[in-house]
Image (cartoon, grey):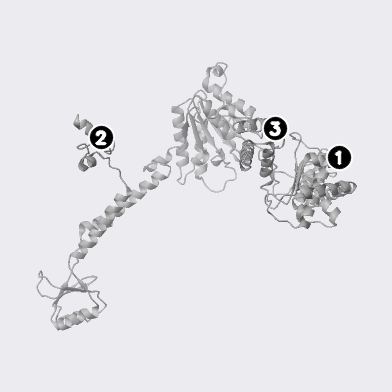
């Protein structure tokens, strides 16, 4: 019982042991587990170095003297015997070897008369071989350096992906198996992408109930590619699939396949699919597929690492067994650069577009992200959704978070509608720079400029309504801005609406010239956008008189609905180019005349709105519309 009591006391740390129960130091050392530390290695090396230095220095007491002093001692007869070493000369004060004697040491110089000098003085001399400690030399010149290299080698490979010291482990994939419910995301947490959810819910249902599809002879797609602009929720959908699927879910990024060693990517692809087949039915998710799936067309050079990885991925996907229940899920925001062989039926059979949400989708996304945010009763998420056309899920999540931070900054417990509007302005126009000092003349020019935009928007049929006018500097160089909010999501625009957009953009420059008789550089961005609209009307939309219904330029593949840039090669003649330039200038000049006339007819309203804007700096939509009448 006493022994057991001692052991229990020791396990508790020996802090509360009674008399006679405290374990001895030897017992503690025996039971204490040994843990290797790098400091042990450093201490051993320093100890060996000190020992080697002491051992060599104690082999024989020697006094180092200059070469001239060494010769003087030979001349005086003090040195009786000289040992000629390779690096040093040693002088002994006795002629007999083995007796204790004072030893002088010097560094030899190129002196061919030294040996005749010894003969002349009758001093005996002999070649002296320096005795070196063989074991210590072996230890310090071979064992310790190689041991240190081996230690660094092991440490390097452990830190490179935590793959141990075996170089063959580079071929192992880095996929992470996600357990059901581990992501904390289900399809209920995804909004604004109903069609994409239905496609993925069908995939999950097939893995749960495969007989329902196989009985009728149907085959599930081997691969599903999620395509969408950044921030639309592709990865979120994949996390939702992992959260509801009752099968193993392998998650991996496209960049994880690429390594500095040639052939590693292909080896990882083989290892990934080998493990997946062993655990089938299962789902493999590869995020950012374009990292390894870029097209091989027009690629200069030989067979590089990325191409080997892509070839292996194509081979593995082509060898799928449609009845095995192995499904490849991938996501990318660059579908136009993927290899055609990767997108053909039989590999990625189904491409699911995760598009930007519409008005209803944006409202649903806002409800999800604001579920845990304390909202004031005045908050209308539908109005917030109307003010954010073209925003994706990530943008909306950022707006909700910014609104909450603004409420905390104002020391309020709930988020108000104004917080959401301010957050939208912060995201769209940038951070307000209220501390920036602007001279009164420039401030007045900015006020007339922004009022010109707003007044043209109010007087132009089909233009987006004005939500706010501000002359508070924001973002990078913006001295003011006019915020317009569309009443609905639009996908097509008529020629009249395009001309209306040009009118609104030219309103600021026309207002400056009308009031001050001069123009400023503030309209640079407006002119760029207006010129681009006019040029695209002629070259892309076939809205010119001479080339009616003719597209003059060949544009690159659109990036997920974004505006495509024209290719550098021009496909029309110099005369056509001259016509395009003249026609663009004519359209801009014609619309500028219309805008100037509109502002002259409403000069009184322009002055009244500008005066009010200079007073309050920010003019809301209700007050602006009341003044416009």
Question: Mark on residue 471?
Answer: none
What element does badge 3 sit on?
loop
Q: Which residue occupies the foreground of this view, 356 or 208? A: 356
Q: Earlier in the sequence, mark 1 or mark 2?
A: 2
Rendered image quadrant of residue 287: top right
Residue 620, image x and y in percent?
A: 77, 41
What element does badge 1 sit on?
loop
Please name the residue that numbered disc 1 is placed on: 629
Question: Mark on residue 380?
Answer: 3
Question: Mark on residue 9?
Answer: 2
Per the model, the C-alpha gap separating discs 3 and 1 is 27 Å
Residue at 16% over, 83% down: 76
**Would you place residue 397 above or below residue 323 in this image?**
below
Q: Earlier in the sequence, mark 3 or mark 1?
A: 3
Residue at 57% over, 46% down: 299
Rendered image quadrant of residue 545: top right
Q: Which residue occupies the foreground of this view, 143 or 369? A: 369
């Amino acid at each position: 019982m006493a022994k057991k009591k001692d052991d229990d006391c020791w396990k508790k740390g020996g802090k509360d042991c009674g008399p006679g129960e405290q374990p001895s130091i030897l017992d503690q050392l025996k039971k204490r587990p040994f843990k290797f530390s790098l400091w042990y290695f450093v201490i051993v090396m320093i100890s060996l170095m000190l020992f080697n230095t002491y051992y060599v220095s104690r082999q024989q007491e020697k006094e180092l003297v200059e070469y001239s002093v060494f010769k003087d001692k030979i001349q005086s007869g003090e040195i009786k015997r000289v040992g000629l070493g390779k690096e040093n000369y040693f002088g002994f004060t006795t002629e007999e070897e083995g007796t204790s004697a004072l030893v002088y040491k010097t560094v030899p110089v190129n002196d061919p008369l030294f040996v005749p000098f010894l003969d002349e003085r009758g001093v005996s001399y002999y070649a002296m071989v320096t005795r070196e400690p063989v074991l210590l030399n072996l230890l310090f010149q071979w064992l310790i350096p190689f041991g240190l290299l081996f230690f660094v080698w092991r440490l390097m490979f452990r830190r490179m992906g935590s793959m141990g010291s075996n170089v063959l482990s580079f071929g192992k994939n880095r996929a992470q198996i996600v357990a059901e419910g581990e992501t904390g995301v289900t399809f209920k947490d995804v909004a604004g992408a109903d069609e994409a959810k239905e496609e993925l819910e069908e995939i999950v249902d097939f893995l749960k109930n495969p007989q329902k599809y196989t009985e009728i002879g149907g085959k599930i797609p081997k691969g599903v590619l999620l395509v969408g602009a950044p921030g639309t929720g592709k990865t979120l959908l994949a996390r939702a699939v992992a959260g509801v699927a009752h099968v193993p879910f392998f998650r991996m990024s496209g960049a994880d396949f690429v390594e500095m060693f040639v052939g590693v990517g292909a080896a990882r692809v083989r290892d990934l699919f080998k493990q997946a087949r062993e655990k089938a039915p299962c789902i493999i998710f590869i995020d950012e597929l374009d990292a390894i799936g870029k097209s091989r067309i027009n690629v200069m050079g030989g067979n590089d690492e990325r191409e080997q990885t892509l070839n292996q991925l194509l081979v593995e996907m082509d060898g799928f067994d449609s009845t095995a229940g192995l499904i490849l899920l991938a996501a990318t925001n660059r579908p136009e650069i993927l290899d055609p062989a990767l997108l053909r039926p039989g590999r990625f059979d189904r491409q699911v577009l995760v598009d930007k949400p519409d008005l209803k989708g944006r409202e649903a996304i806002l409800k999800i992200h604001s579920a845990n945010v304390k909202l004031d009763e005045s908050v209308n998420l539908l109005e917030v959704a109307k003010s954010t056309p073209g925003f994706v899920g990530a943008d909306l999540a950022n707006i909700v978070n910014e609104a909450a931070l603004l409420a905390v900054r104002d020391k309020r417990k709930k988020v108000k509608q104004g917080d959401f509007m301010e957050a939208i302005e912060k995201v769209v126009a940038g951070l307000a720079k209220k501390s920036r000092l602007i001279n009164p003349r420039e401030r007045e020019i900015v006020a007339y400029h922004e009022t010109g935009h707003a007044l043209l928007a109010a007087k132009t049929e089909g233009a987006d309504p004005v939500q706010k006018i501000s002359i508070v500097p924001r973002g990078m160089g913006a001295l003011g801005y006019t915020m317009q909010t569309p009443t609905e999501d639009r996908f097509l625009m008529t020629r009249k609406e395009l001309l209306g957009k040009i009118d609104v953009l030219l309103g600021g420059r026309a207002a400056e010239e009308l009031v001050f008789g001069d123009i400023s550089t503030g309209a640079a961005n407006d002119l760029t956008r207006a010129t681009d609209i006019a040029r695209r009307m002629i070259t892309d939309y076939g809205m010119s008189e001479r080339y009616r219904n003719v597209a003059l330029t060949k544009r690159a593949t659109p990036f997920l609905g974004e505006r495509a840039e024209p290719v550098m090669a021009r496909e029309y003649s110099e005369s056509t180019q001259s016509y395009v330039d003249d026609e663009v200038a004519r359209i801009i000049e014609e619309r500028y005349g219309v805008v100037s006339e509109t502002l002259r007819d409403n000069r009184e309203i322009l002055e009244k709105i500008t005066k009010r804007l200079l007073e309050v700096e920010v003019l809301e939509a209700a007050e602006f519309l009341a003044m416009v009448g």
